[in-house]
Every structure is written in structure tokens, then in C-alpha cells.
Image: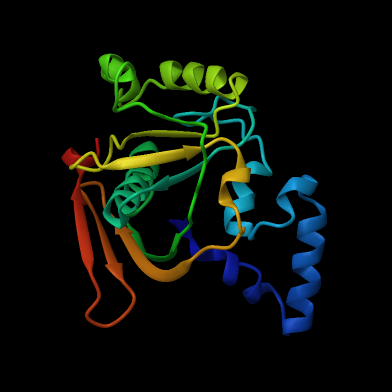
């Protein structure tokens, strides 16, 4: 689940499709080079591995190699994204509620013989470490050890989904095989400090709502 700015963020800065294409090319040249192993991948799959952000995530410490995060259920992906919309509001008290913003939900197939599942023995005995809501030290250390052991995928329980369904942290993009997302559709996500609402773009589509208490 990604914010859909990739289709419109430069459009409002250009007067024609040709100008927009030129601007996109300039912006792409300013980004870190795309490693050769990623060039076969669609950008929705490759982008997380292109950067080394200063802020860490659950299975990636600051400035370490990228991780692609996915969920086995759509609801879970929405809950994870909704947490970060809520977190943005809580960390910026002067910001008004967030109006509906388009997001792209997409599916990808992963396949690997080098995967670990933290919901199974022996790892499940340390579930409190893997599912801590704010401290990522344990999961980041585990991911570093997994990389050293050439593990490609870590499967784990979502902390943000009220039903705690499974997510996957992809450490090596080789697991994407063909390199193309299988499906894409649009969702709109709106957030206040009390709840986050998610609605499918299509008429009569699905919707979910997550309260602050559920996400935090």
C-alpha cells in the first residue's frame, strides 16, 4: 500500500506531458543509482531497495539496506498504512485532520526457500520482542543476523492490524521473480487523531475504519 503521488506529484508543475516526462527524468537522475539487479523490477517493487533512509523501520536500522514490506491480507496492509497516517498527526499537533488521499494497493508474488516465520517455534517464544509496538531494536538486530545468514524473507505478525494477521519483510528483491505487481487498485485514506478511515475508490467498494486505540 503506497501513497499514489507517483502519478500526479509532478503533473501540476508541468504544462504538458512532454514537460512532465522531462521533469521526471531530471528527478530520477538526482536519485541514488538503481542497482543492476533491480532494473528488471517494476518501481513499486524496486523502490524500497534504492534508498537507505535516516529513519529506521521494524526490520531495518537507519541507513541500512532497504526492506520491502507487504501483508498477506488487504486489511492488514491498510492497518499498517493507517498507523503511519495517525502517527504523522500525533507527531505534529498543529496539523489539521488529513483529508482523503489516494493510495495504490497492489499485490506481488514472492517465492523463496530462505525464509523465516517468527510465529513458529523456536522464534515464537520471543514474541514479545518481535511485536513490541515502539521499540524495534530486537527486530532490527534479528534482521541483520538474517541478512548475514542469507535469509530473504521474514514472516511476522502485524502489530497494527487488530487481528494480527501476517506481514512479510522482504530483505532480498530476488524473491519477486517476474518483477511485476499482479494487481493495482485505488483506496482513499482519511485520518483524524481519533480514527483512520479507508475506502475503496470503486463505487460500492470495501471500507475499513481503525480507531486510535486499535492502531496504537
Q: Which quadrant of the structure image shows residue 10?
A: bottom right
Q: Is residue 95 left or right of residue 121?
A: right
Q: Residue at x 57, y 45 (%)?
A: 175
Compared with 82, 179 (above or below) is below
Above/below status of 19 relative to 4? below
Note whether residue 92 is visible.
no
- Asked whether the viewer can see residue 196, the reply is yes
Residue at 69 percent of width and 44 percent of height: 50
Give above or below for 24 relative to 2. below
The N terminus appears in which quarter of the rendering? bottom left
Q: How is the image coloured?
A: rainbow
- Indicate the position of residue 101 as horizontal and vertical percent values: 40, 65
Q: Identify the image quadrant of residue 161.
A: top left
Give the percent coordinates (x, y) of residue 135. Answer: 38, 20
Q: Position of residue 195 (x, y in %)?
A: 21, 51
The percent position of residue 52, horizontal first and vertical second, equals 66, 35
Relative to 115, 16 lies left or right: right
The quadrant holding residue 25 is bottom right
Q: Quadrant of the C terminus?
A: top left
Q: Residue at x 56, y 20 (%)?
A: 144
> Closer to the camera, 30 or 2?
2
Q: Residue at x 61, y 59 (%)?
A: 178
Left or right of 149, for residue 85: left
Amino acid at each position: 500500500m503506497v501513497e499514489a503521488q507517483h502519478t500526479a506529484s509532478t503533473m501540476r508543475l508541468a504544462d504538458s506531458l512532454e514537460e512532465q516526462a522531462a521533469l521526471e527524468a531530471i528527478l530520477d537522475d538526482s536519485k541514488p543509482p538503481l542497482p543492476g539487479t533491480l532494473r528488471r523490477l517494476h518501481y513499486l517493487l524496486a523502490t524500497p531497495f534504492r534508498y537507505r533512509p535516516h529513519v529506521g523501520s521494524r526490520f531495518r536500522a537507519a541507513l541500512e539496506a532497504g526492506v520491502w514490506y507487504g501483508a498477506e491480507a488487504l486489511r492488514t496492509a491498510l492497518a499498517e498504512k493507517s498507523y503511519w497516517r495517525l502517527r504523522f498527526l500525533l507527531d505534529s499537533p498543529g496539523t489539521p485532520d488529513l483529508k482523503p488521499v489516494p493510495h495504490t494497493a497492489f499485490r506481488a508474488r514472492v517465492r523463496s526457500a530462505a525464509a523465516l516465520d517468527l510465529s513458529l517455534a523456536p522464534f515464537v517464544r520471543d514474541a514479545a520482542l518481535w511485536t513490541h509496538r515502539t521499540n524495534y531494536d530486537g527486530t532490527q538486530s534479528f534482521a541483520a543476523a538474517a541478512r548475514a545468514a542469507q535469509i530473504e524473507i521474514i514472516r511476522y505478525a502485524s502489530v497494527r492490524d487488530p487481528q494480527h494477521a501476517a506481514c512479510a519483510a522482504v530483505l532480498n528483491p530476488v524473491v519477486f521473480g517476474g518483477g511485476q505487481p499482479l494487481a493495482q487498485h485505488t483506496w482513499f485514506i482519511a485520518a483524524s487523531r481519533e480514527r483512520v478511515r479507508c475506502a475503496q475508490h470503486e463505487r460500492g467498494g470495501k471500507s475499513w475504519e481503525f480507531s486510535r486505540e486499535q492502531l496504537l
